[in-house]
Image (cartoon, grey):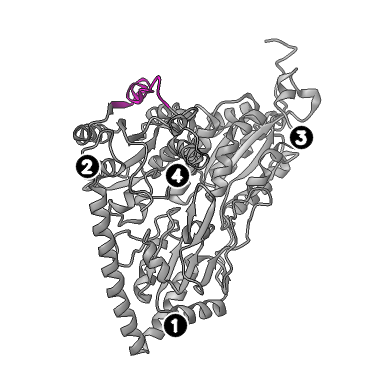
Amino acid sequence: MDAKTDKKPMENYTGWQSDIIVDLIKQYGFPFITLNPGASFRGLHDSIVNHGNNEPPMMLCNHEEIAVQIAHGYSKATGKPSAVILHNLVGLLHACMAIYYAYLDRQPIFIMGATGPMDEGKRRPHIDWTHTALVQGNAVRDYTKWDYQPTSIHGVPESFARAYSIMTTQPTGPIYMCYDAGLQEMPLTEKIELPPVNSAHTPSLMMPDPKALEQIADKLLAADHPILMPEYHGRREGGFESMVKFAETLGAGVWSIPNALNFPNKHPLSLQFDKVSLRKTDVMLGLDVRDWEKQIVELNSTTRETEPLVKEGCEFLEIGFGEINISKWAMDYCRMQPTTVRALGDTILGVPELTRMCAERIAKDPKLQKKIADRKVMIGKRHDEVWARWDKENRENWDASPLTFARLSHEVWDVIKNEDWVLTANDLKKTIPKIWDFTKPYQHPGVELGTSTQIGISIGVALAHKNKGRIVVDIQPDGDLMYDAGALWVAAKYEIPMLIVMHNNRAYYNDWEHQIRMAKLRGTDEKKAHIGMDLFGPEPDFAKLAQSMGCYGEGPIDNPKDVGPALKRALAEVKKGRVAVVDTITQHDNPNRHK
């Protein structure tokens, strides 16, 4: 033993201060902890392994961004938070984009970081200085609900409890707790009280003002062509079912914003993507909507000009969280939509109450009953017409090579439609909802966010459904996977089965398309629009990449006739508990995307 560095424990030693953090993690019931290793939390890491017996288990991730995204996807699928640990300043900076997207997507993620030691006398030369910030939480303060850095072990339990409460209060979002490396590594020499086990972790839900709900009921029942527009409502437990009951009671069409699965897409009252029906609307009720504008205008992406899709005089109503938790930094709140009634509160309470109010009035009014019955028939006919047109459009260029978006969507659907399936994200968000049949609330937690988010979030969704006998499908864009290809290894290591179907157009085509628009506007050479956008010369081999990570891989496939058999072989591997990747080559643009 080196007497200079190895000292005997104090006589009243009872453990280490980082043990208290582990006790809190256990008490609050986190299912797992995602992380990329770092010396700044070596004390906490040791406590998780030895004091906590690695329960909840740590999941090693190849990048901090992946660690946050897996937690993000798990929360999207379950509504429950998980924990992430990020290594001091540099690990936090690696994760910033993923934290921002979790904030935009209202996902409760308990992010723990480390810094210091803040005691300068304890810092190692160079590394503990360059990896420490004052105050470290400033790096993410503008896009987390709260951050805190306790200065002693006495502040750890209370701040942990407060952080959990803030994180899980609607609208939910990520928080960041920063623990001094020196604090973690100090011996625990006294009893530290944890929050009472039976204490409420989260406040009760907020009911909208009953008077405002009465006003909304008045306007909906008086309307000729009301539209219900839910955005986040369906991701909450019971939200999908309550939306169906509300629409059927009112006889109103539903335009679902795909940040959640709010409504069955083949239900006769579903009018999503039908701009003709939108133009008839005289009253529109937004249900926990963040971005109205994208849904109700026609955008000219070249000129940035918009035209309204709803008629002049359409009245807007709203139930939701309004200005609660709006960022002071990012403009994620989007353009404000004037509304005549704004009921501040939780739609998960407001929708059932509004349904009850409307049902009572309808039951007493035979004329209103007939009006609603006739409207249901009218909407149902329109729904059938739209679906018939989509089916015809989706069969166009059926045998084209590379594949059309619709052909790929059909091929995947034909293979999984008789399974208990889940679609993770949805890069084909304007095609798949016109083909697949979404009937269960868990079948889709919402569309992807920006590039470099889909594979990590999809793994988190698949983790949430592991051991439930469900086939989890990720329609995976190539550019996104190139950011975080190492995420495939994480899924393979922790045996998280999922079917990954590459929507591979060998390009960052969204931006390529913007350059085509600029070329057309300015009269420059469209043939040069791909420069700085293409993913060929060389083309990534995603099948071999998957195989190198321990996954099943097949492809690339550009012949539509070969896709179905390949998907069936991959599905057989998924049912064995593996990750399977099928690389399909798709066209650059969807000819029906603008219809």
Q: Amino acid at mark 2?
A: Trp
Q: Amino acid at mark 4?
A: Glu
**Helix, strand or loop status at disc 2:** loop
- Please tell me which residue lies in front, 517 or 213: 517
Q: Which mark is residue 222?
A: 1
Q: Where does residue 150 sit, x and y in percent of width and height? A: 72, 41
* Front: mark 1 or 3: 1
**Helix, strand or loop status at disc 4:** loop
Tag 3 or tag 4, which sits nearer the N-term? 3
Where residue 235 sits, quadrant-wise, is: bottom left
Q: CB of mark 4 within 8 Å of CB of mark 3?
A: no
At 43% from the left and 81% from the top, the residue drawn is 221
At 28% from the left and 33% from the top, the residue drawn is 402
**Helix, strand or loop status at disc 3:** loop
**Helix, strand or loop status at disc 1:** helix
Q: Where does residue 297 sit, x and y in percent of width and height? A: 49, 59
Whether 260 is among the magenta residues is no
Alpha carbons under labels 1 and 2: distance apart: 46 Å
Which residue has dot 4 on it? 448
* Front: mark 1 or 4: 1
Alpha carbons under labels 4 and 2: distance apart: 26 Å
Q: Amino acid at mark 3?
A: Leu
Which residue has dot 2 on it? 398
Tag 2 or tag 1, which sits nearer the N-term? 1
